Image (cartoon, grey):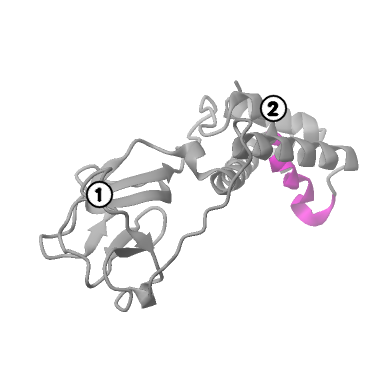
Amino acid sequence: MANRGTIRTSLLALLGTSSDDPLYSATVLNPIIQQALDALLADVQDANPDYLALPPITLAADSASSHLYTFASQSTPITDFGKWLDVRYTDEDGTPLAECRLDELREFGTDYFTLYGTDESPILQTSHDSPAGTALYFRYAAWPAELVDDSSVPAGLSTRYHDVVALEALFAFGLGGEQQRPRDLEMRWRDRRAQMLSRVGRRGIQPSRSRVVAVDL
């Protein structure tokens, strides 16, 4: 298991420099490490949305007559939203809702929704013909917490792949436009990154499947 301080030490070694190098100070590298981690987590969410799933919650409408569900206004504000996984009326046995674009919401009839706004403060809106004010069963994949200090450990990645964060951060070679990432490190980064995403995307022996959803217009 590697914390941010350990990852930064590894990154300095890969860069072939030391912590007293002003070009690669902690002030410079800490944001780069966070950016590298965010890039990996985004690809993890796309490779397997279930990987960072949280237990289901209930979304309350903004009012009894509203089609809006403001995440920041929930009894426990939702600030870590990454991807929606399941949206249903009331509970896990409720009728599922399908996603559509905001400009389609009025024409699509009942049992549709859209999400808009940034991940930090999204709003879910149900279609005009859907019942207003109804509680929604909601399951989503979350963004893990950011690294706040050198003792912070990257959440959302297996400890077996914490080295990939340092390898991902090797775009730091290009600071100032003076260096390129060495070919051997480039190959190592690509191999370990692909290995991690392959493991995330397929966690058993069953082949991956695609799902086709019919939409009634």
Query: Residue 34, percent across and down?
Result: 57, 42
Q: Residue at x 69, y 27 (%)?
A: 9
Query: Residue 23, percent across and down?
Result: 73, 43
What quarter of the picture does the C terminus occupy? bottom left
Query: Residue 116, percent across and down?
Result: 37, 64
Instruction: Name the disc covering residue 9, or none.
Output: 2
> In this orientation, does residue 180 appear?
yes
Please say if 180 is above or below 197.
Answer: below
Which stretch did the figure color magenta? Answer: 166-179
Q: Give the residue pinned by disc 1.
A: 94
Sequence order check, earlier mark of 1 and 2 = 2
Please say if 157 is above or below 32.
Answer: above
> In this orientation, does residue 19 appear?
no
What quarter of the picture does the N terminus occupy? top right
Judged from this view, the residue extending furthest toward the right is 183
> Is residue 175 within the magenta segment?
yes
Q: Kindly indicate the quadrant of the structure image that contains residue 68.
A: bottom left
Disc 1, SS: loop
The chief SS type of the magenta part is helix
Kindly identify the amino acid type of the residue bearing the numbered disc 2: Thr
Q: Residue at x 29, y 51 (%)?
A: 88
Q: Residue at x 37, y 61 (%)?
A: 98
| Mark 1 residue crowding within 10 angstroms, few (<14) / some (14–19) / many (20+) | few
Depth check, front residue: 18 or 91 = 91
Q: Residue at x 77, y 54 (%)?
A: 176
Q: Is residue 154 left or right of residue 104?
A: right
Q: Kindly indicate the quadrant of the structure image that contains residue 55.
A: top left
